[in-house]
Amino acid sequence: MHSFTRRAGTLLLPLAAGLTLTMTTAHPSDAASVETWDKVAACESGGNWSINTANGYYGGLQISLTNWQHYGGTVYASRPDLASKKEQILIAEKILADQGAGAWTCAPGTGLSTDTADPYPEFTGAAAGDAGNPAAAVHWDDRAEAYLVQGNGGIMTSAESGGGWAALSGFAEAGTAKAVSAVLDAKGRTVVFVLQSNGGVATRTETSAGSHSFGGWSFLADASSAVQAQSVRFADGRLGLVVVQSSGGVAVRAETSPGSGSWGGWTFLSSSGIKSVTAGVEADGRIHLFALQTNGGIAETTETSPGAGTWRGWSSGFAPAGALSTDLPAAQGSSIAVGNLADGALTVAIVQSNGGVSTRYQTSPNGPWNDSWGSLAPAGAAQSIAMARHTSGVLSVVIVQSNGGVMSRVETSANGPWSEGWRTLAPAGAAVSVNTARLGDGRVTALVVQSNGGVAGTAETSNGSGVYGTTWAQVAPAGAVSTS
């Protein structure tokens, strides 16, 4: 009833920060849901995630100290029983991928050998927010927190609380910010990136994973250098920052090692001609950038390999000149949304210059793109768009209509066709922009900036359904953010 130390046929390769990567032949299952891990823990330890009986195995999944150290568990705690349930499961995922379900004698009957679900799936909705499009992140303690830029340039936050949202609290003083984005680093800490009012870029990091307490500001880009800043996460766990410069160029900067908080120099991808950038992640982990050009077209580029930090040249014509508007007000959010289909292939949805909504997708994971754009909504339909992948694998698109209403559309099945029609979530005049975020329980919520300057959210009716409710929870009161 314990996690064995089984190393036959493995090859250890060095990684950054003293970790090791174990390369072995593939096993039938390399991931399992939290529900399945709970079944394993119920058998292994009676579901006691902090158990230590001095038998050489620790925590809910009875992981040996040798395995804990070998698979990088000491990043979280010195022993499994001293780590959180989530941290134990993350290390167990590595053991499962390497050694297979047979590493646990309790595996039979739990579904561990056949379950392939990701216990903590990466959210593939929008990666950045601005004053008209709040950012959100799920902390290591599985509690979502929304970050919003006020009309006066201050930043306020609101965390999930009792099925709703807590009262706003201050994060940055007035005059600080134009835009904000948030992401977890390799140590599970939330890192907040801010495009400053002066055109610089600054960042704050949680003092420890899930603490909701942040250290001081660090500055990554000088004043007057940036008009957009978006956070990304590379395949090796390093955080990155993609900046559109005031000159219209694009530059990228990355951590020197995962979770280090130390940053390398800038890599310059273009010198001019770019209005904004939206990032996606290929199935193999490469960052893929989609740039709205000053001519209203879209150009795109990808990393040469996952985590390489080197980039292919820009490919123009992903969308032709004039396809999108180049003068979208900041308060109206984004006109480009990127998400992953259930098989990992990317899909892109855009609000066209005529207000229609169109999509384009990869024909296979990491593969080529279909030849033409498909219509999802007619001309005049939309002014802002967001996209999210749900725990079931289905994608949803949420738009703010040209009349200020809010509507959504969802795939009928993972990798399947879109639903026949749009579902109304809020009436005309309700909203000016939309973003999507994941809640702590895994459900996706749509966050809108209301026409009165408030912020409200509505979540899926059930986890993975992709069907949003029509009852909105208030995140911030009227006047909290700018609508112009």
Image (cartoon, helix red, strand yellow):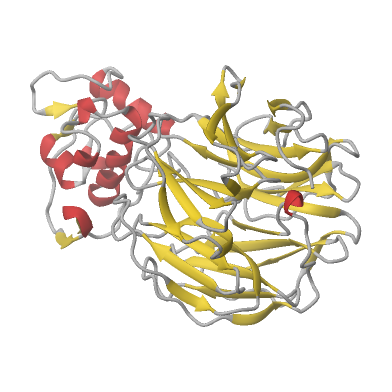
- Expressed as whole percent of the image width and height from the top left, the position of residue 421 reads 85, 48
From the viewer's perspective, is 99 left or right of 465? left
Front residue (pair 249, 414): 249
Front residue (pair 193, 448): 193
Q: Where on the picture, by quarter, is residue 86?
A: top left
From the viewer's perspective, is 307 left or right of 362? left
- Expressed as whole percent of the image width and height from the top left, the position of residue 336 reads 69, 60
Quadrant of the image for the N terminus? top left
Residue 446 in view in this figure: yes
User: Residue 374, relative to residue 401: is it above or below?
Assistant: below
From the viewer's perspective, is 446 left or right of 441? right
The residue at the point 39 percent across, 43 percent down is 114
Front residue (pair 38, 284): 284
Q: Where on the picture, by quarter, is residue 239?
A: bottom left
From the viewer's perspective, is 418 left or right of 444? right
- Expressed as whole percent of the image width and height from the top left, the position of residue 160 reads 56, 25
Q: Where on the picture, by quarter, is residue 18?
A: bottom left
User: Residue 459, relative to residue 383: is it above or below?
Assistant: above
The residue at the point 34 percent across, 51 percent down is 28
The residue at the point 38 percent across, 47 percent down is 185
- Expressed as whole percent of the image width and height from the top left, the position of residue 2 reads 17, 31
Front residue (pair 188, 63): 188
Residue 365 in view in this figure: no
